Amino acid sequence: MVDMALPIVLFVDGDASILIALTRALRRDCIDIRATTSPHEALEIAMNEEVAVFVYDWLLPEMSGTELAQRIRCLRPNVELILSSGAGDSDGNAVFAMVSKASPIGGMRAAVSGAIECYYSRECRRTG
């Protein structure tokens, strides 16, 4: 039997209540959730763990979500990015999906699931 680790999904949002709601809603989705309001903590997590999907907001304390996504991508080139924002425009990063904070949780669930599938497809092509 092969021991497969759950994919790590890293959520960063300046609003802790949003992180709590996302964690509660997605905790049964066979993913390993990391959530933080701190961009610097997010970078530390990405340095030490194989993050498959990074979900972020534009408005963060200490640095912009755009800058943080670029730094995460430098650490984890194959990470899939999902922009979760109240605004409706892309930030210039090549994101897998944009999910409005106003949309039902099903939209985030579908985006995370699709991003994980894409991440593992790319990993299989890269190592296979």
Image (spheres, rainbow, N blue to C red):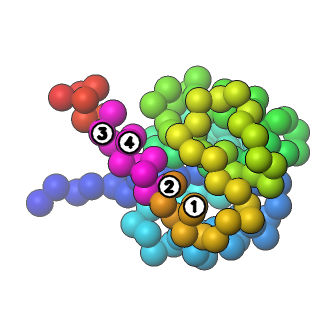
Q: Which residue corresponds to the image point at 75% horizontal and 40% vertical from the top-left?
A: 89
Badge 4: how crowded within 10 Å, few (<14), some, or many (20+)? some
Q: Earlier in the sequence, mark 4 or mark 2?
A: 2
Percent position (x, y) of residue 83?
Answer: 66, 45
Residue highlighted by disc 1? 108
| Neighbourhood count class around disc 3 (C-alpha, 10 Å): few under 14, some 14–19, many 20 upward | few
Q: Mark on residue 112?
A: 2
Q: Is residue 118 magenta?
A: yes
Decide: marks 1, 2 in contact (CB < 8 A)? Answer: yes
Q: Amino acid at mark 4?
A: Cys
Residue contact at pointers 3 and 2, CB within 8 angstroms: no
| Rendered location of residue 98, percent (x, y) | 63, 47
Segment colored magenta:
112-122
Q: Mark 4 highlights which residue?
A: 118
Q: In the rendered structure, which amino acid carries the disc numbered 2? A: Val
34 left or right, relative to 65:
left
Q: Amino acid at mark 3?
A: Ser
Circle 3 residue: 121
Q: Residue at (73%, 61%) from the top-left corner?
A: 101
- Spatial CA distance of label 1 from label 2 is 6 Å
Q: Are marks 1 and 4 in contact (CB under 8 Å)?
A: no
Secondary structure mostly seen in magenta is: helix
Residue shown at 38%/57% (left/top)?
A: 6
Label 2, residues with CA under 10 Å away: few <14, some 14-19, many ≥20: many
Residue 16 in magenta?
no
User: Which residue sits furthest left?
Assistant: 1
